[in-house]
Amino acid sequence: MSSKTNACWKKRVEGIGGCGRECAARLCWLSGLRTLRMGTGLVSLAFLASIVCGALQAEPVSRADKPAAPQPAWGDKPCDKQASPNSEKAPSASVRVQPWVTLGRETTFFTEPLDRFGYVDYAAALSQELGRGVPPEKNAYVLLLRAIGPRPLGEERLPDVLFRRLGMEPLPDQGEYFVPLAPYLREGAGLKNGAAIDSVLAQERVARTRSWREQDHPHLAAWLKANEKPLALVIEAAQRPLYFRPIVRTEKLAGDASELVMVSDLLALREMASALMLRAMLHVSHTDYGLAWRDLYTVLRIARLVGQAFSIEVLIGSALESTAANSVIAYLEHAPLTPAQWRQRLQELQNLPPRKPLADIVYWGERAFCLDFMQNLHLHHFRALASYHGGSEKTLLYLLAPKLFPWEKILRRTNACYDEIARALREPDRARRTKALRAFFEQKLSKLAKQESDEAQLKALLKILSDADSDQAEQWTARLIAMGYQPLLRVMQSCDRADQTHALLQTALVLHIYRLEQGQYPEKLKDLVPKYRADVPRDVFSGQPLIYRRTARGFLLYSVGPNEKDDGGRTATDKPPGDDIRVQIPKPEPSTP
């Protein structure tokens, strides 16, 4: 490239600040070295550089009266502190940052707080929304965190901002915190052999649903003894009426959208729930039926509380509830309570706190996660996508995209999609929810989100870069949103399974009360109406009455499950496996191959 040409390009990038100037300047230099091959045509890098210059000069300004926010340098990595968005340190009051797009309900959804680069701090915004009206003294998570400790499962320390948002001082590293089973076996029990540890872990899974004594499983009994104080905090936490778990970021992960979803504390909570179910079955063996129910009911309450912001929380809560149901069935089989006592247990099941609607999870949390992901693409030059696809041509295009994408158009379309998904999830029953979701994803969105070859995707990306008014931007957005369809269906199915399991538990208790008062189980479910139930319980998945069979020693009660086919009451753990959701008295022995 001649010096005259270089001077021309240098003049074109004058006035472009920060990252944009260096981006265009580098493209000018590269244009003298190579061209970018697209299909059968050649697209000059010099042409792309001119696009950069024009786009940057014409970039829409949302708050023209405010000075531009400091921009991260070209070489900053997502984990660099100086380029990390949404840091907990708010901008000085004297510094007025300019947002990266026009703020509003239709674009960024949340409009404050902003970080020092003018990006929405979605962690803080979502925490403010979820924590409204939840004082620390009524927040179950405060006590749960005191039981878990500042390093859940022995991992990296939780950030101090998490404790501040809960209105509490950061916990010290040393304390009487919950110790998960595997670390306890290695360090507390001195087991070094991996096979020995695996054996105890397998015993624990079985003992959660079988009455057992200390001499049967001495390591398990010692583990429960070592965790008495943190488990007492969990029981106290379950009695609190509200739950707020702040959304926080860590310096290590700053700039990565995945940092919004911290799960180490939730996994520790799952371990504590397992310990309570295990202890409940130990109480049953000692005829301490009141203490056994207290532990089981604690797990059921906690399971309902944890799903507040993101789908992963919903999945963990639903799994806890479904797992606890197996222990409740074992309790039902072994506890010789009176009909009045069983009615009290039934009433407590009916009074469990309602699960937060999945529509609200999508409307607030999942939307915030997606928007946060998009602004991180803008800030970090699509590095994640560039690394995923690989190749210098693709990398260069993805590095160009942040400044050239029609972001406001993309954000508006994204918010419209989440509004429509939330509306579909608010349909009153599973059949209508499924129909509405399919209408949106499979009929409307799939036409835009069609799969294309790498070459076609690159051409589409170049089209977006050169023409903000093209429909390629909407197709790119649709493809991104469509990626969440199958995961969303799995989360909805998990919620429906948990709801169905809960309904089966209630019906099982009613059947048990009927047997205690009538001397035998009813021949049909309609025999429960109207004295024991107002109506015949229906299947969440089929919409038909639950399938019930009286047996010689008890009963079999089941739902056809998500596949909506009658598998004869077989579940995923049976041989051959099925898809039904079952309650059976007496509880069947584990299947063998």
Image: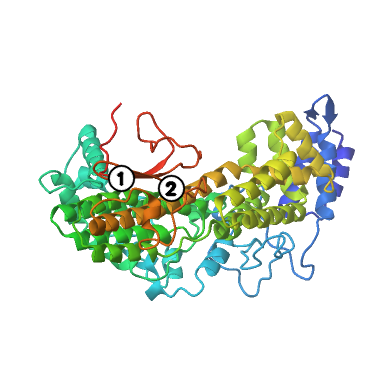
On screen, residue 75 versus residue 67, left or right, reads left
Image point (39%, 61%), residue name: 533
On screen, residue 340 versus residue 530, left or right, reads left
Q: What mark, if any, has residue 546 been given in the picture?
A: 2
Identify the residue at the far left of this view.
215
Query: Mark 2 or mark 1, which has the lower sequence index?
Result: 2
Say which of 582 and 288 sits in front: 582
Q: What mark, if any, has residue 555 been given in the picture?
A: 1
Q: Amino acid at mark 1?
A: Phe
Residue 126: x and y in percent read 55, 64
Residue density around tag 2, few if under 14, some if 14–19, many if 20 or more, within 10 Å: many
Query: Does the rendering let one see residue 158?
Result: no
Q: CA distance from mark 2 to mark 1?
A: 13 Å
Q: Amino acid at mark 2?
A: Leu
Residue 181: x and y in percent read 25, 47
Residue 422: x and y in percent read 62, 56
